Every structure is written in structure tokens, then in C-alpha cells.
Amino acid sequence: MAEHLASIFGTERDRVNCPFYFKIGACRHGDRCSRLHNRPTISPTLLLSNMYQRPDMITPGLDPQGQAIDPRKIQEHFEDFFEDIFEELSKFGEIESLNICDNLADHMVGNVYVQFKEEDQAAAAVQALQGRFYSGRPIIADFSPVTDFREATCRQFEENSCNRGGYCNFMHVKQIGRELRRKLFGKYHRSQPSRSRSRSTSPNHRRGRDYRDRGDYHGNGRRTGDRHGRYENDRRRPASPRRRSRSPIREGSEERRARIEQWNRERDEKK
């Protein structure tokens, strides 16, 4: 019996636990759902509910005044938000993935999912985000049961074939450009110069928002201010050049080769 219950946990056959909450950390029925939402007390994944506010939130493709918005401007606005959130959250630990929903349903619109490498990093982020604001709206951060985003995302959306549009019950994850992804996630895989130096070499570098001392995680769509003067403590020294040295394995290989050649000469002399 226990094995059977474990095998159906979080699936459609489970009549006790909500499968959608288990898969995507959100349910369209909310607290009125007839099934249980087992909220984790600790998890490497955080959900920042309804945090991203796209400029065409009211009507897709139009601003609040009803004027058409260039899709490139919408993407630029999104990537500014993505980079800002990533750099703030990365202060608490290594980020495995950062996914932002492009869905339109109330329980998923603007949801931000961040998965840290370690659970204690996520716990530190939750504690630090309590009572903070973003664009004048409070940040709602909770642990999420989602650990496998392959099960949470809509495969049809990735293939541009989802017929439910923004009201799909699975995540429509909005993508960033390849260059920005390499810039943000690549630092975990290779050493880079300090952030301030790499940014200062480009006249078109992005500018940070003002994270004020009163805990207001502030943003107003476009970035304002100069991050270089506000993050003195976050600057990192450029990685020192690696010295070339002969590998002991390589030296051992040369010695072994020399011994083999000597053995061959001695063998030839005996013949």
C-alpha cells in the first residue's frame, strides 16, 4: 500500500495531494483547492510570486495607453529585469537556474523561480527578502516544491505550438538572449575579471538600480543610477594569471619513456 501511494504521489491519480502544486508550485484554485498543497519547509528552489511586471501586462503588445510596443523593447525590458534579479540573488549563493513565467493566469503571471545549488543558500535568500519591495510592490518569497523544471515547463510552448496560450497550466518560461545567459551563468564555470572592470570597458554597460538601505528593492522598468559607486564591497579582484608549471604526471611520463628506451638499448646490446 505504501509503495502504491508513493508511486502515485503528485500525479493525476493522487486524490489527496494537488499534482499542479507539486509540479509547478502554484495552483489556479489557490487555497480553495480540494487537494492538499504540501508546502516545503526547506527547498533549494524559491518562488517569488507575481514579481515580473511586463510593460504590456494589460494588453499583449500594447502599453497602458494603447500604443504598440516594439517587441525588442519588451525583450530589453525583460532582460534588464532578469539581470537585476540574478545579480541580487546570486549574493546568497550559486544559482542553478532562474526561470520567469510568461503565463497570463493570475496564479502564474510574472512568477520567478530561482533554484540555488544548496538549500541553506535558498534559506538565506528567503530571510533577506522578507519585508523588501520591488517597483513599489512587496516581494513574496516562499520555498517551492519544484526541483525538476523539465516536468514543470510546457513542451508545446517551447515548440511554439501551445494552443492554450498564456493561460496554459504549465510554465511558459520566457527566454533571455544567449549572450546574456553566457555572461551570467558562465561565471560559475570559468574565472573572469572583476565585474566593475569588465563593465567599465564598455560605454553601453547596463546600470544598476538603487538598493536602498531601508530595504527597498527598487526598480521602475529602466535602470537608473551607477552600480559602480554602490557596490564597492562586491568588487572582486581580477583573477591572477595562472603560472605555467610542468605537470608531475608529464615529468613521470618522460622518465618512464627514458627507462623504456634504456631497456630497449640494453636488450639490443645483449643480442
Image (cartoon, rainbow, N blue to C red):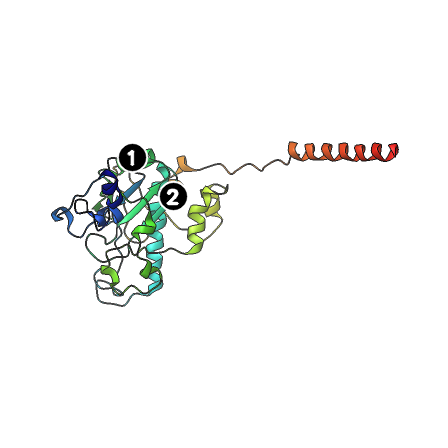
Q: CA distance from mark 1 to mark 2?
A: 15 Å
- Indicate the quadrant where residue 232 lies: top left
Q: Which mark is residue 96?
A: 2
Q: Residues within 10 Å of mark 2 (few under 14, many from 20)?
A: some
- Quadrant in which the N terminus appears: top left
- Indicate the quadrant where residue 246 lies: top right
Q: Residues within 10 Å of mark 1 (few under 14, many from 20)?
A: many
Q: Amino acid at mark 2?
A: Glu
Q: In the rendered image of this protein, does residue 248 appear above or below residue 167?
A: above
Q: In the image, residue 60 lies at what x, y percent?
A: 25, 64
Q: Which mark is residue 123?
A: 1
- Indicate the quadrant where residue 94 lies: top left
Q: Amino acid at mark 1?
A: Ala
Q: In the image, residue 31 lies at what x, y percent?
A: 13, 46
Foreground pick, 164 / 108: 164
Q: In the rendered image of this protein, does residue 48 appear above or below residue 240?
A: below
Identity of the residue drawn at 29% across and 35% down: 123
Q: Earlier in the sequence, mark 1 or mark 2?
A: 2
Q: Is residue 96 visible?
A: yes
- Mark 1: secondary structure: helix
Q: Which mark is residue 184?
A: none
Foreground pick, 197 / 59: 59
Q: In the image, residue 83 lies at what x, y percent?
A: 37, 49
Q: In the image, residue 268 lies at what x, y percent?
A: 85, 35
Q: Is residue 204 visible?
A: no
Identity of the residue drawn at 83% across and 33% down: 267
Identity of the residue drawn at 41% across and 42% down: 228
- Quadrant in which the C terminus appears: top right
Q: Are marks 1 and 2 in contact (CB under 8 Å)?
A: no
